[in-house]
Image (cartoon, coloured by chain):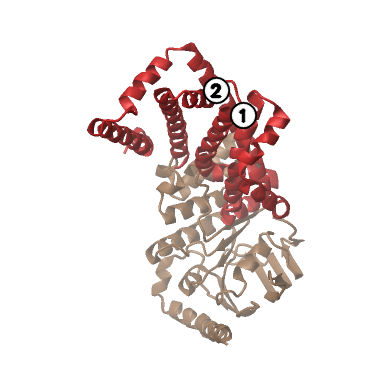
Chain colours: A red, B brown
Amino acid sequence: MTAIQAHFRAVAPPVVLMGAVLVLWQVACWAYPHPEPGPVSVAATLLHLMGKAYFWHNAAATGRSFLLASGISIAVGGALGLLIGSSRLLSWYLAPLLMIFQTVPKITLYPIVLELFGLGMAPKVAFGVMHGVIPVYFITSRLVAGVRKVLLRSARVMRLGAAERFYFVIVPAILPDMIATLRVSVALCLLGVLIGEMFASHSGLGFMAVNAINLGDTPVTLAVGFFLAFMAVGINTLLLYCEHKLRH
Amino acid sequence: MTENGQTDVPCVELRQVEQRFTTRKGGNVHALGPLDLTLRRGEFLSIVGPSGCGKSTLLDILSGLARPAAGQALLNGQPIRGVPDGVGIVFQEDASFGWLTVENNIAFGLKRRGLARDDIAARVEHALDFMGLRRFRTSYPSQLSGGMRQRVCIARTLVMRPSLILLDEPFGALDQQTRLLMGDELLRLWRETNATILLITHSLDEAVMLSDRIGVMSARPGRLIKLVETGWPRERDSTVVSSPHYGDLLSEIWAPLRAESNHHMAANNA
C-alpha cells in the first residue's frame, strides 16, 4: 500500500460517513415530504449565503476566535499536561483542582466571563479556552505519565539530562497521541466559541444562527450548521492525516 | 592477559552491596545482598537466579540508575555515582525509539553527546554493517521484527563504545532459534569490541553457551551462592551446545538453582 493510499484509508471513513448521512437525509425528505428543508435545499441556501459579504464577516469572526481559543488551549493545556504529568508533586496539588473545574458546567460561569471580559472577541475566546484547555491538559498529562519507562531509562543511560529527556524522548513519544487529543479539544473550543457567540455577541456564525432561529429562518440556521459541520470535519480530517503521518 | 582474552584487572567490583526498598504501604523489602563480586576486564559473566532475586536491581546499581543502600560498587576502581561514562545497557523490553528510523535510533546517543557529524556517520555505518541492519536503515522500529528491534538497541549501545555492556535478558522476548543466532552475534560482538559483558538471564542454556563464568544467585534477598567457570575458549559459538561439557555445566548450575527455586516457591506458597 502506498503512503497516499494509507493516508486516504485513514481520512476516508469520516468523510464517507458524513456523505452517507446526507444522502439518507435527502432520500427521507423525498420519501416523506415536510416543510423542513433537505440537504439539497440547505446547500443551495449556503451557496447563496457564501456570495454575501456579511456571511464571510461572521465566518471570519468565528474563525479568529476559534483559532485563538484553540492555540491558547493547546499551549496552556499542553504545558500544564507536560509539567503535571512529569511531576508527582505538581500532580498531587494541581490535578484535583483542575478536575473539579472540569466538572463545573461551563455555561454557569459565562456571566463571570462576561463580567471580566465584557462583550466582543475576548469572552468568546475565553469561553472556548474554558472548554478546550482541561481536556488537553488531562490527556497530555496521562500520555506523559504513560511514556514507557524503558525509553526514559535508556535515555538516562545515554546520560541525557532531564530537559533533554523531556525534549528528545517524552515529547516525540506522545506526539501522535497528542494530535488525537487535539481533534477532541479543538472541537470543544469551537463549541465554546459558538456558545459564546450565541449568548452575547454581535458577530460570528453562532450569532448568525441564533438570529436565524429567532426569525424562524430554518434554511439559514441549517446552512450555518452545514458550514460549521464542514469546517469541523475538515479540521478533523487534517488532524487525522497529521496523526497518521506521525505514526510509523 | 589470559588466552581467554581477559585480564586480571577488575572492571567491576561489588563489595557487600545491598539494596532495600520501601513499599507503598511502608514495608521494607530487602531485595539484594550483601553481595561481593568482581568482574574482570574483558570477561563475559552471566548471572542466573530465581525470579525476583534482585538480578535487575543489580544491573540498576551497576548502570548508576540506582544507588545501593549499603556497600560499595566500583567501576574501574571508581565508586559508581550517577550513570558512569563507558557503560551501555540493553534491556529486555524493546527500547527503540518508535519515532526514529533505524539509523537515527543508532545515532541518537552520539548526536546528544555532540560528536562530529563525520564521526557519527562512520560509527553508524559500521554498526549497520556489524548488526546486519543496512537494508533496514530507513525503516521504523514498527516495521521490524522483535529480533531486529533488539539488534537496533544493541547497535545503539555499541556505537557509544562502552567498556562495560550490561544486558538485562536482551533475548527474553525472542524465540529459541533467534536466541541462539543472536547469542552467536553477541559472542562475535564481545570478541571484536573487547568489552566486558554482564548478562542477566533466566535462560540457563544461554548462560552456559555464552559465558566465561556464571554466577548463581539465591532467592530474595539475592546473594551469590555459586560461581562456575565454563572453561570455553574465547573463539566459541552456539555449537558448544553439542559438547558433553555443556551438559555437565548445565547440571552444575541447575543443582543449586533448583534448590533455590524450590525454596522461593515454598516461601511464596507459605
Q: Residues within 10 Å of mark 2 (few under 14, many from 20)?
A: many
Residue type of the residue flagged with mark 2: Gly
SS category of the residue bearing label 2: loop
Question: What chain letter is assigned to the residue under label 2?
Answer: A
> Which is more N-terminal, label 2 or label 1?
1
A9 over A39 or under it: above or below: below
Q: Amino acid at mark 1?
A: Lys
Looking at the picture, tell me which residue is in the foreground, B31 or B74: B31
Residue A150 image-quadrant placement: bottom right
Look at 53% across and 42% down and name the residue there.
A181
Q: Residue A62: percent from the left, percent from the top?
A: 55, 24
Q: Which mark is residue A204?
A: 2
Q: Residue at x 60, y 24 (%)?
A: A201
How packed mark 1 is, by other alpha carbons closer than 10 Å (few <14, some 14-19, many 20 or more), is: many
Q: SS for tag 1?
A: helix
- Report the front residue among A190 and A185: A190
The residue at the far left in this view is: A31
Q: Chain of mark 1?
A: A
Q: Which mark is residue B133?
A: none
Q: Which residue is mark 1?
A: A124
**Image point 62% across, 29% down: which residue?**
A124
